[in-house]
Image (spheres, helix red, strand yellow):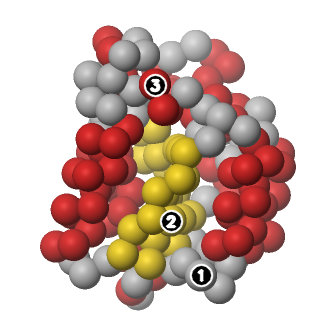
Amino acid sequence: MKILFLNGPNLNLLGTREPDKYGNETLFDIENFIKKEAQNIEVETVFFQSNIEGELVNKIQEAKGNFDGIVINPAAYTHTSVAIRDAILAVQIPTVEIHLSNIHTREEFRKISLTAPACIGQITGFGKNSYKLGLIAVVDFISK
């Protein structure tokens, strides 16, 4: 089984960006954590991060036929991107939306996700464990 992890804008700044909300670990730290978790369940993972919406859309489209599932942290695009939402719907690959912080306890505009309705589920507020829970959820969904 092969799972694509996609990360949106500013997640490349984890570790230094608002550590009170996002923690001190870098995106690289989180990727290494997930790679170890994935090895334990014999799942291959690939990671991609971009600050550019179109690059994320391209990766979602390229995933069709190449990946069994997607775990996506669209970051700020969660609240604005019809393009990412439409790409998720178009490829018909089971996708889980994740967030490090609990978007439902933050600013009003962050409580609305345009992308979540295109996904099989949303996990929010568990820090790096949101990534682990996303992995478990998509693998479980695919395995049924």
Instruction: For label 2, count other residues whose C-alpha is less than 10 Å away and answer few (under 14), some (14-19) or many (20+).
Output: many
Q: Earlier in the sequence, mark 2 or mark 3?
A: 2
Residue at the (49%, 32%) spot, across then down: 11
Three-letter residue code for mark 1: Asn
* SS at mark 2 in the image: strand
Q: Residue at x 63, y 49 (%)?
A: 116
Q: Nearer the viewer, residue 130 or 36?
A: 36
**Amino acid type of the residue tagged 3 in the rendering:** Leu
Q: CA distance from mark 1 to mark 3?
A: 28 Å
Question: Which quarter shows the N terminus?
Answer: bottom left
Q: Give the number of callouts.
A: 3
Q: Position of residue 19 (x, y in %)?
A: 33, 15
Q: Amino acid at mark 2?
A: Leu
Q: Nearer the viewer, residue 142 or 29?
A: 29
Instruction: Give the position of the C terminus as an image quadrant.
Output: bottom left
> In the image, what residue occupies the spot 75% across and 60% down?
58
Q: Is residue 66 above or below residue 16?
A: below
Label 3: how many Cα within 10 Å (few below 14, some 14–19, many 20+)? few
The answer to whether residue 80 is seen in the rendering is yes
Locate residue 138: give its quadrant.
bottom left
Q: Which mark is residue 13?
A: 3
Q: Which mark is residue 66?
A: 1
Rendered position, 100 above or below 72:
above
Does the rendering let one see residue 102?
no
Which residue lies under the disc numbered 2? Answer: 4
Q: Kindly identify which numbered label has been placed on residue 94.
A: none
Is 21 situated above or below 117?
above
Asked if marks 1 and 3 touch (Cβ < 8 Å), the reply is: no
Determine whether label 2 and label 3 are within 8 Å by CB.
Answer: no
Q: Report x, y in % for residue 142.
A: 45, 81
Q: Residue 133: x, y in percent?
A: 32, 55
